[in-house]
Image: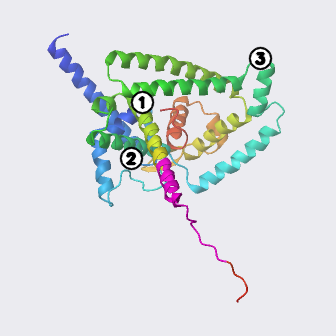
Amino acid sequence: MNNKEEIAKKVSKTLQELSDSVAFENIIKDNKIEFVIKDVQYRVRKPNLCEQEIADKEKNRKYVELINDDNCLFREQWIEKYKSKGIDIEKMESKIRQLETEIEKILLKLATVSNEADVDLLKSEIEILRNEQIDLTIKKTDLLSYSIEDKLLYHVNTYVTYLVLEKKENDKYTKVFDSFEEFSSSKNSALINKSFYCINLIVYNQNEL
Amino acid sequence: MNYNILKKFSRSVRWQTIYARVKEIGSLQLFNNTSDLTKLQLLVMQWTEIYHSLYEDIAMNKPYIDEKIIEDELRTEAYLLWRRKNQNKDVDSQIKQSKDNQKSNNNSGRPSMIFTRRGKKK
């Protein structure tokens, strides 16, 4: 690679980093995230107190519905059911914790070494353990995704997204969907997926990051 | 977007400078909203504070930390864990020392309280 190409590559990387930084700052500047899909400007925002109360009521309603459904089980019940079929989730959890302890031990070694070769070796050891830990966590999450707790969480996330998703019309933001049923049956998957992603950044956990 | 962007943003010179000014001058603020912060805003604040403390450690010539380590997320994680464990050790040794001091102060054999009997007046 000649000098000009190297410089061009560096400039391109710097510009990309700058663009990422500006985009990120735009997301965190307030408690709303705006985005454009097919030339329409949308936004999701943190639910206000009234919307949180509405979401809580919906959560209670859904909870009652789920516990009255004989096909739905709690996490603990799923764990017992899987155990009887030879899948031990408690053992998986214990293995995840054990891996964390092993990772911590290597991290403590990594903190005090400076030799490049030692650093690389410890980093690769951590990576192997982390991958094993991630695989187990995904397996556990998949197995328990049918539980009442997980179903309820997914429903509430969806409901909150419906409540706070708005589009810009004549410089004013208004709700995109008139009812939850309309939202649930929407064919605009790009809009729904982007809204889920944004609401997760605003309200829920940081796993998406 | 991934977690690395958040950390990269939080440790950037520009954001760290804004954060330092906000800490100094009360009327400045990091975000447009002053309350009702989102999870992401809280996370940015948390990592900004962590990196701020790391830069302070470098300024104070603390061992095992430099700019190169801050750029490496795994090594930063390692340093933060090491620092936490060592801070805990320091606190434990301080508690032990203060307990030892208390014990040695009681070596005089004199009671720490003087009890008097309330009896009949002679």
Residue A187 painted magenta = no
Residue named by callout 2: A29
| Badge 1 density bin: few <14, some 14–19, many ≥20, Cα 10 Å | many
| Distance (Cα) linking label 2 and label 3 | 49 Å
Indicate the chain on which mark 1 is placed: B
Q: A33 or B93: which is nearer to us?
A: B93
Residue situated in front as seen by the camera: B109 or A134 = B109
Circles 1, 2 touching at the beta carbon (< 8 Å): no
Magenta stretch, main secondary structure class = helix
Query: Circle 1 sits in a helix, a strand or a loop, which is it?
Result: helix
Residue sitting at x 37%, y 27%: A112
Magenta range: B95-116
At 30% from the left and 30% from the top, the residue drawn is A17
Q: Position of residue B61 (x, y in %)?
A: 27, 39
Residue located 67% across and 50% down the image: A56
Q: Which mark is residue B78?
A: 1
Horizontal arrangement in the rendering, residue B83 relative to residue A174 (left or right): left
Quarter where residue A100 is shown: top right
**Residue under disc 1 on the same chain as residue under disc 2:** no
**On screen, residue A199 above or below B3:** below
Marks 1 & 3, CB-CB < 8 Å contact:
no
Q: As drawn, which residue projects farthest toward the top?
A: A1
Q: Quadrant of residue A122?
A: top left
- Label 2: element kind: loop
Element marked by disc 3:
loop
The answer to whether residue A167 shows anywhere in this view is no
State which quadrant residue A152 falls in.
Answer: top right
Mark number, residue A52: none
